[in-house]
């Protein structure tokens, strides 16, 4: 269902349930994601699968859906012989597919257009390290065109997500400035710091005082990192916090597979909420079952 409120209005009153990992749901539907474009390949080859994955989360109770544009970039599409105009259409399509799934359920659902880090385009695990050897201007030039393409499709918010490095966060905030759509800024963290090793309070401080930044938080990290990071984000910025960790399993970029067991527990959301989280969900390896449990838990207080 199309929201009757802005996302900011909803966050002033409610804690919203975010979806889970798109890639694991696509794999559960039988999709092959071994390509360097990952789930973004399906924007061209099989977009119905993407909408079906969004729909699975919406039916489970998700109130915010993140688009399939995390790894969708003009540069990545160009390597596949896809021109600028068609790439822009596919970025816009990612928003439309999420909106289509949202329209099919009876509760309000907002669409967050994913803007992944530069490292996601490299498809080599760099988003968990940062420090690409690029200047701030280089990163800003990289991010701005796809931000413009996504905004043109009308999302409710831009998710500047899985950001490993405060320098890239600064470039993303510059690239999105004045775009006309609010943003959230979400770091991936380890050991209580950004993946690039920076102080987390200083990293969140980049968003403090910026009216265009709707929320800040963490994603695609071990669930055990979340509670402390949420408290830091809320204290430093005074903004609503987003929290959507992965399952706690480790990603082996060389083998392109997950290792270890899941540490994701929907009940932990009570702690995250108490510390300031207002949008709560999951990332890689967190599926509709966990999101459904999370939605039920939050509905019952």
Image (cartoon, helix red, strand yellow):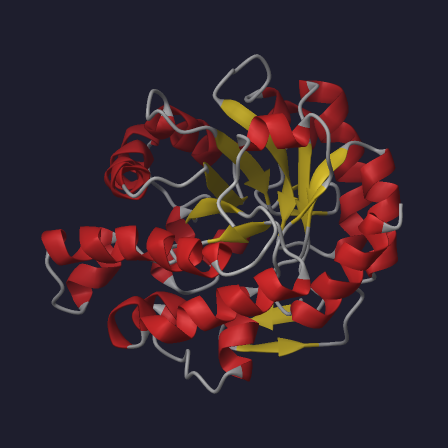
Across and down, in percent, residue 89 comes to 20, 54
Please, is residue 188 above or below residue 102 in the view? above
Across and down, in percent, residue 234 comes to 74, 26
Across and down, in percent, residue 149 comes to 25, 42
The residue under the point 30% across, 67% down is 43
The residue under the point 41% across, 84% down is 32
Residue in the foreground of this view, choosing between 247 and 98: 98
Q: How many marks?
A: 0
Residue found at the far top of this picture? 209
Quadrant housing residue 239 = top right
Res. 36 visible in picture: no
The residue under the point 81% across, 53% down is 224
Decide if residue 67 is on the left or right side of residue 16. left
Across and down, in percent, residue 294 comes to 78, 58
Residue in the foreground of this view, choosing between 289 and 116: 289
Residue found at the far front of this picture? 106
Please, is residue 208 above or below residue 50 in the view? above
The residue under the point 37% across, 60% down is 97
Please, is residue 297 above or below residue 141 in the view? below
Looking at the rendering, in which quadrant would you find the C terminus? Answer: top right
Residue found at the far bottom of this picture? 30
Residue in the foreground of this view, choosing between 251 and 226: 226
Decide if residue 115 is on the left or right side of residue 92. right
Res. 37 visible in picture: yes
């Amino acid at each position: 269902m199309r929201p009757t409120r802005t996302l900011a209005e909803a966050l002033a009153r409610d804690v919203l349930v975010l979806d889970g990992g798109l890639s694991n749901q696509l794999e559960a539907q039988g999709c092959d994601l071994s390509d360097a474009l990952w789930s973004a390949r399906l924007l061209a080859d099989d977009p119905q699968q993407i909408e079906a994955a969004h729909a699975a989360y919406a039916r489970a109770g998700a109130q915010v859906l993140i688009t399939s544009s995390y790894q969708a970039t003009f540069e990545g599409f160009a390597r596949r012989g896809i021109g600028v105009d068609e790439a822009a259409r596919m970025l816009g399509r990612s928003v439309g597919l999420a909106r289509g799934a949202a329209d099919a359920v009876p509760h309000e659902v907002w669409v967050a257009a994913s803007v992944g880090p530069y490292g996601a385009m490299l498809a080599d695990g760099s988003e968990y390290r940062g420090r690409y050897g690029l200047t701030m201007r280089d990163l800003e030039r990289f991010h701005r065109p796809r931000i413009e393409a996504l905004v043109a499709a009308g999302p409710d918010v831009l998710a500047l997500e899985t950001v490993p490095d405060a320098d890239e966060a600064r470039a993303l905030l510059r690239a999105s400035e004045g775009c006309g759509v609010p943003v959230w800024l979400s770091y991936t963290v380890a050991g209580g710091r950004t993946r690039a090793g920076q102080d987390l309070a200083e990293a969140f401080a980049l968003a403090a005082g910026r009216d265009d930044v709707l929320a800040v938080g963490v994603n695609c990290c071990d669930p055990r990192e979340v509670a402390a990071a949420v408290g830091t984000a809320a204290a430093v910025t005074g903004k609503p916090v987003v929290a959507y960790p992965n399952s706690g399993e480790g990603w082996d970029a060389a083998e392109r597979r997950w290792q270890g067991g899941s540490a994701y527990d929907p009940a932990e959301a009570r702690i995250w909420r108490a510390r300031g989280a207002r949008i709560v969900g999951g990332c890689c390896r967190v599926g509709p079952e966990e999101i459904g449990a999370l939605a039920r838990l939050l509905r019952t207080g």
